[in-house]
Amino acid sequence: MTSLATFENGARAGGESPDVVISVRDLVVGFGDKIVMKGLDLEVYRGEVLGFVGGSGQGKSVLTRAILGLVPTRAGVIRVFGQDRDKLAPAERRALEQRWGVLFQNGALFSGLTVKQNIQMPMREMRDLSQGLMDELAMLKIELVGLAPDAADKFPSELSGGMVKRAALARALALDPELVFLDEPTSGLDPIGAAEFDELIGTLQKTLGLTVFMVTHDLDSLYSICDRVAALAEGRVIAAGPLETLLASDHPWLRAYFHGVRGGRLRAARAEQEDEEWKPAPTTR
Amino acid sequence: MTAEAMHGPPAVARAPAADGPRLALSGDWTLEASPLLEEQERRIIEEARRGRFVAIDLAGVSRLDTAGAWLINRARRELARADVAVALEHVRPEHSILLEEAHYRVFEAPRRPRTNPIVDLLADLGESMAGGVREFVRGVAFLGEFVATLGFVAAHPIRFRLTSLIAQMELIGFRSVPIIVLINLLVGAIVAQQGIFQLLKFGASSYTVSLIGILVLRELGVLLTSIMIAGRSGSAITAEIGSMKMREEIDALRVMGLSPIEVLIAPRVLALVVSLPILTFIADMAALFGGLLVSWWYGGISPVAFMSLLKEAIAMNTFLVGMIKAPFMALVIGLIAAMDGLATKGSAESLGLQVTSSVVKSIFMVIVMDGLFAIFFASIDY
């Protein structure tokens, strides 16, 4: 489908089919008496952009954090690149963690470092590169995410919200990961900035052959860049598939989400646009 | 394809061809092979520099990332500058996107204007002086605002927040009692021990009691209590008001037509002003008791003798000198804490800075005030 499928010839250990990057089986996560995930199943395929939606407080972030290993799980198996984190030796786990990049919701840039130093941090800690090459690569990443070169020497507190997101994306891409987690990448951006960011993610995904796991509330992002959408409710994935499948679903929450006031309006606008321009909808790639 | 793409370390192999050297690249040209990757780039340049033309064959490259693409492009550019024509062969489509995206360009770093360090130093000095003066003016203005608010509340007693005052007194005063008692007991004991030990040389160890009585009541009790409260409660007030400022709660109060000074700051400062004298009294007693214990066990002065010596050494004014200072110290601590809390900006770092600055400033001001009081009491002979 996309380039990375050919970069990697065959899956590594684990016996999964080569195209599954993340597989979650029967996941149970809870805090105290409260069970947040009740036997959740999810698969993310290589080279796709998966949009992950769900109501506030349903545990979208908890699932992301569980996959990243930041939240302890009670039962179930999470495999990333066919490997079960819990069964890996520390060195193998570190190697696994270097194959993904994470964009946190508020950027999570290190406030004591400049943008350039933030991007070079993983390179400096994990790789052995000359300073000259690190400078060039950092500037390349800065340009790749659409930041002006003079942003390189700025501190995170001197950046606007949109610039913070871009800089954080550049840091997430510092080691050229195969898999990128985006936690609400367009939240807090104005519609123009959000659309630009969507486009950026789409472009980078194609150029670098990324697999993208994107938690989002933004209906526009779902329409414009996601190959598949998974919906979370009641501690389970209630539906996963191309957007059309979810739109056709009868589940009350999905109907409310996509056919509610905002979803309905957006759908109508998209349909109108399609009629005028006679080109296929951006969702059907 | 001439070669099978294989995983492995990046490598460059030379194969002579009719029209010039031919370099076959193989392996993973990714960041993971970091020190090797840069070596291979140098190898490409070295191998090809002599000739006029070189073909670089990418068929054997299994994985390529932006770093690998960048280095291949950097080598191409280096060779081009040495008048070597470079042709890339067998580039896979996904690699060509990357090579395109990571084409070589020189990033000019924005240069900061050079400045004279001496001028910078003088400018910094001047700025911090001016900042100090501005801060002082702001403090006086804040004091005025606070007094005006108190006057307003006095005129409208119904707006006085008694519940809040009591709650703050518990937090600031009552909860501090154990630590205040403990440190003052220890300091009283240490002063007594040193007094007995040093004065024994002159055979004047009974003067220890005068030393403890005067030192503790006039200076140490109030000073230690104020410093402790500046660290414990001043920082808490700054943190609390600062985080409310960060989350726009202060602005929310203002737009409701409420004065943050009246609602938040007056109860805290008043609680400090009421609590600190009480705590000072407790501190005085604890320190004297500590002194009494050490004098008894270490210096052999019985409690009865200690009491009668103490009675001779001190008068009411000795005690009052300490107590009079307490509310002023409280006012300084409270106003600095509140002012620094309100000066917090949007970020968490700013909150941390304000809390530190509040504690440092209030301890400094407490000691300065103590000095001023010492001059004042000496000149009126009290």
Image (cartoon, rainbow, N blue to C red):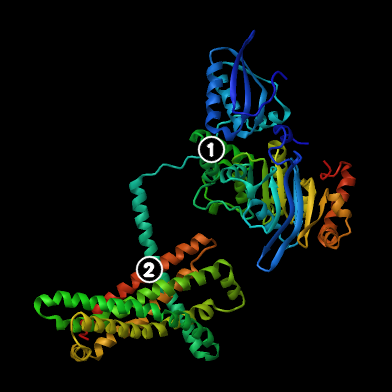
SS for tag 1? Answer: loop
For the N terminus of chain A, the quadrant is top right
In the picture of the structure, the residue carrying the numbered disc 1 is: A127
In the picture of the structure, the residue carrying the numbered disc 2 is: B361
Within-10-Å neighbours for mark 2: few <14, some 14–19, many 20+: some
Along the line of sight, which residue is nearer the eye, B6 or B233? B6
What residue is at 58 percent from the left and 79 percent from the top?
A: B258
Disc number at residue B122?
none
For the C terminus of chain A, the quadrant is top right
User: As drawn, is B221 to the left or to the right of A115?
Assistant: left
SS for tag 2? Answer: helix
- Determine the chain carrying the residue at label 1: A
Along the line of sight, which residue is nearer the eye, B53 or B253? B53
Residue B98 position by quadrant:
top right
Report x, y in % for residue A174.
59, 41
Report x, y in % for residue B26.
63, 24
Report x, y in % for residue A228.
79, 47
Q: Is disc 2 on the same chain as disc 1? A: no
Report x, y in % for residue B196.
17, 78
Relative vertical location of residue B72 with respect to residue A198 in this rendering, above or below: above
Relative vertical location of residue A48 with respect to residue B342 in this rendering, above or below: above
Residue A186 showing in the rendered view: yes
Q: Which mark is in front, 1 or 2?
A: 1
User: As drawn, is A135 to the left or to the right of B2?
Assistant: left
What residue is at 80 percent from the left and 49 percent from the top?
A: A223
Q: Amino acid at mark 1?
A: Arg
Relative vertical location of residue B30 with respect to residue B366 in this rendering, above or below: above
Residue B108 showing in the rendered view: no
Q: CA distance from mark 1 to mark 2?
A: 45 Å
User: As drawn, is B358 to the left or to the right of A68?
Assistant: left
Furthest toward the top, the residue is: B18
Q: Amino acid at mark 2?
A: Lys
